[in-house]
Image (cartoon, coloured by chain):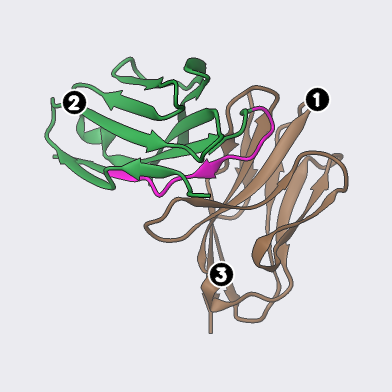
Chain colours: A green, B brown
């Protein structure tokens, strides 16, 4: 099976812009989660989607949003970018979410200048 | 709230020596535990998982971990490390339907 794919792999944006990141889960996986990884804060949970519904949400401002489509593909959007949003954004998929291991994509490296 | 504590931020070790990376989790009625490895400029790769059953869990690349409920620990071990094991290792916990919570990571540095 193909793994989790994320596009784009690298992105450079300017403060104030918005960005959309895409994630395609492993075939058959219905749960997609997003994480932000930075040197200072480590791995922080953003949100989790299951069957197009947001099931969990982390402690991030409303500028961070996401959605999941009927084919389980997911997107996350960050509006009004700030310098502190520079990070590696990781997407992970799992069969159902509860208890099942998550499989991670390679991430999208976002740099905000 | 869930919390995962990785007790060592860096662990230097010589090649072919044994290693233990320590992890403590917060207690919960039902908890699922994982170890992930991250190589530079890559995503996270699952090493092993504990869902239930045997407390000794074997994973990929010769790693194993032991679930200890009384000490709320889930330490990762390898009897003999290789240079290629140099990476960052993350312990993670999931309780019920809650989100996966990661520790701060341990950088394993294998020296020749």
CB atoms at circles 1 and 3 under 8 Å apart?
no
Question: What residue sits 68% from the left and 53% below the top?
Answer: B22
Question: What residue sits 35% from the left and 27% below the top?
Answer: A75
Q: Position of residue B21 (x, y in %)?
A: 66, 58
Tell me where the magenta segment starts and ends, as one range. A98-109
Residue corresponding to mark 2: A18
CB atoms at circles 2 and 3 under 8 Å apart?
no
Q: Is residue B48 left or right of residue B46?
A: right
Q: Is residue B81 left or right of residue A20?
A: right
| Displayed quadrant of residue A94 | top right
Residue corresponding to mark 1: B29
Q: Is residue B39 magenta?
A: no
Question: What residue sits 41% from the left and 55% below the top?
Answer: B42
Tell which tag, 1 or 2, sits nearer the viewer.
2
Q: Position of residue B24 (x, y in %)?
A: 70, 43
For residue B85, the mark is 3
- Magenta-colored segment: predominant secondary structure: loop
Q: Nearer the viewer, residue B2 or A102?
A: A102
Q: Is residue B108 left or right of residue B94?
A: left
Q: Nearer the viewer, residue B23 or B63?
A: B63
| Label 1 element class | loop
Q: Position of residue B81 (x, y in %)?
A: 64, 74
């Amino acid at each position: 099976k193909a793994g989790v794919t994320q596009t784009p792999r690298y992105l450079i944006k300017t403060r104030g812009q918005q960005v959309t990141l895409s994630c395609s889960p492993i075939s058959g996986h219905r749960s997609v989660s997003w994480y932000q990884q930075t040197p200072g804060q480590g791995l922080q949970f953003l949100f989790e989607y299951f069957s197009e519904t947001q099931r969990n949400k982390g402690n991030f401002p409303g500028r961070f949003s996401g959605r999941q489509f009927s084919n389980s593909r997911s997107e996350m959007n960050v509006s009004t970018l700030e310098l502190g949003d520079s990070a590696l954004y990781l997407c992970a998929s799992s069969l159902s979410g509860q208890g099942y291991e998550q499989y991670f994509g390679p991430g999208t490296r976002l740099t905000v200048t | 709230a869930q919390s995962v504590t990785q007790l060592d931020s860096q662990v230097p070790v010589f090649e072919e020596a044994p290693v233990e990376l320590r992890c403590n989790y917060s207690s919960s009625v039902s908890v699922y535990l994982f170890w992930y490895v991250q190589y530079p400029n890559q995503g996270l790769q699952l090493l092993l998982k504990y869902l239930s059953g045997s407390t000794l869990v074997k994973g990929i690349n010769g790693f194993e971990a032991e679930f200890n409920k009384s000490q709320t620990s889930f330490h990762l071990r390898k009897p003999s490390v290789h240079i290629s094991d140099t990476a960052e290792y993350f312990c993670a916990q999931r309780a019920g339907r809650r989100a996966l919570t990661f520790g701060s990571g341990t950088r394993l540095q294998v020296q020749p």
